[in-house]
Image (spheres, rainbow, N blue to C red):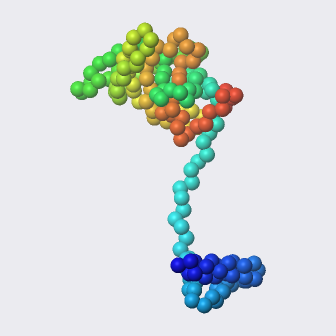
Amino acid sequence: MADNFFKTTLALAALLSCAACQSGQAVRPAIVPGVEVRMPENKTAKPEPRPVKQPLKVIGEVEPVYFLPMKSPFLSRIDTGAETSSVDADHVVSFERDGEKWVAFNLVNRETGEKHRFEKKIKRQPTVKRINGSEERVVVMMDVRMGEEIVKAEFSLAARDRFNYQGLIGRNILTGRFVVDTSLANALR
């Protein structure tokens, strides 16, 4: 077995060091008695092209987010630690429509005063545990625009009036779309 390994190694070394290999000419295998060297077949079939993945957009720690169909953006905190995005909603009223749970709520842009009443089907109602107890949240699907990209994503309806920013953009929107550079702000304007 060791003798066969030696012969194979010798044949490969001769093949790789030949002048034809170095000059780019056609390669002829070296002849070593008792060793068979097979050249790889020339395959002309091209590999299937991979889908081209678009580069991720770089955004800052605060970005304008349009909650469609509203015309003015909500400055929103970009939070890679948050799984689900959140928005400051008021006058939240749950109701039933066709046997399903729905919610009506207002979004009011603090900067411009623009107001819009939404009615959305409730996607889920997770319980969020806090230091001072637990709170049930309502999560709905919202259409938002960030830069040129329109995204349909889950948003938790929350009272964010004590926060500086009315929106919070979490990983459910960021993943696969954006990279965050915390030294930037308003990169999407």
Res 116 seen here: yes
What residue is shown at x 57% (from left), y 86% (from top)?
Answer: 35
Q: Is residue 78 above or below residue 32?
A: above
Query: Which residue is most to the left?
Result: 99
Q: Position of residue 47 (x, y in %)?
A: 54, 67
Instruction: From this view, report whether residue 54 is shown above or below residue 172.
Output: below
> Which residue is drawn at the image coordinates 55% and 29% (left, top)?
80
Quadrant of the rendered structure where residue 187 is? top right
- Residue 65 visible in the displayed image: no
Residue 52 in the image: state x and y as whole percent: 57, 54
Between 8 and 180, the residue placed more toward the observer is 8
Closest to the observer: 16 or 58? 16
Q: Residue at x 61, y 79 (%)?
A: 6
Instruction: Tally the numbered discs.
Output: 0
Q: Quadrant of residue 134?
A: top left
* Picture coordinates of residue 184, whole percent (x, y): 69, 29
- Left or right, 9 with respect to 118, comes to right
Rendering quarter of residue 157: top left
Q: Nearer the viewer, residue 66 or 14?
A: 14
Q: Residue at x 37, y 20 (%)?
A: 127
Task: Answer with left or right where residue 154 lies relative to residue 31.
Answer: left
Q: Quadrant of the C terminus?
A: top right
Q: Is residue 106 left or right of residue 63?
A: left
Q: In the image, residue 18 lies at what x, y percent?
A: 72, 82
In the picture shown, does residue 41 fall above or below 33? above
